[in-house]
Image (cartoon, helix red, strand yellow):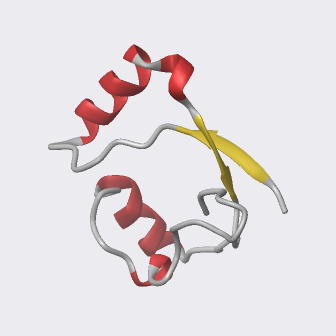
Amino acid sequence: MNTVKVYMVRKPSDFEEVKTLCKKYTHEAEEVLIEETVNLPPTWYEEFCQRPLDNYIFLSGKGGYDDTGHRK
């Protein structure tokens, strides 16, 4: 399974806060397992880009940790 390094920010007030914290804590990137690749219709993709912190059906049931402790 593929992995990617990402920054986890809990309950950000906006996307600018996410970007600021990622720049400030560059050494704290966490390796995450990629569970699935989703091909979104253009309208869904545009909506996701405009509001990345909203809830989306294609993310339902995703996340958490696997049996070895890796974040998914």
| Residue at x 59% of width, y 57% of height | 71
The tally of labels here is 0
Q: Quadrant of residue 47?
A: bottom left
**Vertical arrangement, residue 9 with respect to residue 62, above or below:** above
Q: Residue furthest front?
A: 68
Q: Left or right: where does residue 25 sit relative to residue 69?
A: left
Instruction: List the single residue furthest toward the right.
Output: 1
Q: Quadrant of the N terminus?
A: bottom right
Of residues 11 and 67, the one nearer the viewer is 67
* Farthest residue, direction left: 13
Which of the two residues, 64 or 61, is positioned nearer the viewer here?
A: 64
The answer to which image quadrant residue 50 occupies is: bottom left
Q: Residue at x 25, y 31 (%)?
A: 16
Horizontal and vertical percent position of residue 48: 39, 62
**Residue 59: image location, x then y, percent:** 47, 76
Image x and y of residue 22, in percent: 42, 26
Q: Quadrant of residue 34?
A: bottom right
- Is the residue 3 above or below the residue 30 in the image? below
Looking at the image, which residue is at 70% across and 45% down? 4
- Left or right: where 34 falls relative to 40: right
Please state, as top left, top right, bottom left or bottom right, where the C terminus lies in the image.
bottom right
Is 2 displayed left or right of 22 in the figure?
Answer: right
* In the displayed structure image, the side of residue 14 where residue 44 appears, left or right: right
In this rendered view, identify the residue nearer to me: 64 or 69: 69
Residue 21 in the image, given as x and y percentages of width and height: 33, 25
